[in-house]
Structure formats: structure tokens, C-alpha cells
Image (cartoon, rainbow, N blue to C red):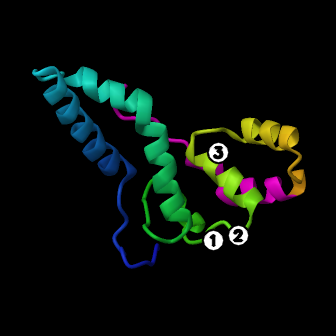
Amino acid sequence: MCRSQASVPASVYDQAWQEAFRHKWIESEKHGRDLGPAAIKDWNRRHFKRCCRWCHWLHLTGRQCFREFPRQQFNTVTDPRDDVERQVIHQYWDGQENLEIYWCAHGSGWPIERVSVVLLALGINEARLSPLVT
């Protein structure tokens, strides 16, 4: 069981819905009319992956347990300690996949072994979710 200050596991989908509806409200206000499901689809297309990655990061660092992620990943990662960790984690937050991060690391001259350790700890492949509404 996840143990943290927030002992009841949250849901990535609940977080995403809150953000998607906030987006729908803001965009509808800007346009002077209710944009309806189109605004939700727009948010999913533009922001769901980043929201999911952020929730996954909170889960990995033990700040919030999310039931959609493996329990054995909860509280297994610390905040970045060096530039390589920071760069990899920022690319992860931006939605980059393992291969894209490796490609960047190679081009930037980062130590590939170090990048591999960080990517293994992040477990990107185990944290992929799809939006409920597309």
C-alpha cells in the first residue's frame, strides 16, 4: 500500500479531468461560448501526457500515491542531484520517450550509463496512460 501524507491513492484521471474542465472553462470564456467536448479533446491532445508525467513524478518521489501506477514504484526516486539527472527528468516531464532522451544524451555528451540508471528509475514504459476521452 502507498504510504504518504496523502494515504488515500489519488487518480491521474481525476486530476486530468479537473485540469481539462478548467481548460474548457477558460477557453469557452475567451470565445464567449461553451466549446463543449472540443475543448476537452484539445486539452487531452495538448496536455494529458504532461499531466500524467507530473502525477507519475509525484508518485515516484512519494509526494502522492496514484492508483494507476505500480505501487512498487511509489517513493523510489529522489529529487535530481546533478545536471544529468535534471536534464533527463526535464525531458521526461516534457513528454520525451526513452529513445529520444538517449538520442539527446548522446548528442550532448552525457554519460550514457548515468542516463540509463535515471531512465530505469523513472520507468517511463510502465507509466503510459491514455486519456479517457480522445
Say which of 104 and 67 sits in front.
Answer: 104
**Residue under circle 2?**
81
Quarter occupied by residue 122: bottom right
The disc labelled 1 sits on which kind of residue?
Thr
Say which of 105 and 38 sits in front.
Answer: 105
Say which of 109 and 116 sits in front.
Answer: 109
Residue 92: image location, x then y, percent: 62, 47
Q: Residue at x 81, y 53 (%)?
A: 116
Residue contact at pointers 1 and 2, CB within 8 angstroms:
yes
Please give the label number shown on residue 91: 3
Q: Is residue 116 magenta?
A: yes
Residue 102: image location, x then y, percent: 80, 41
Q: Is residue 69 magenta?
A: no
**Residue under circle 1?**
78
Looking at the rendered structure, the secondary structure element under dot 3 is helix
Residue 109: image location, x then y, percent: 89, 46
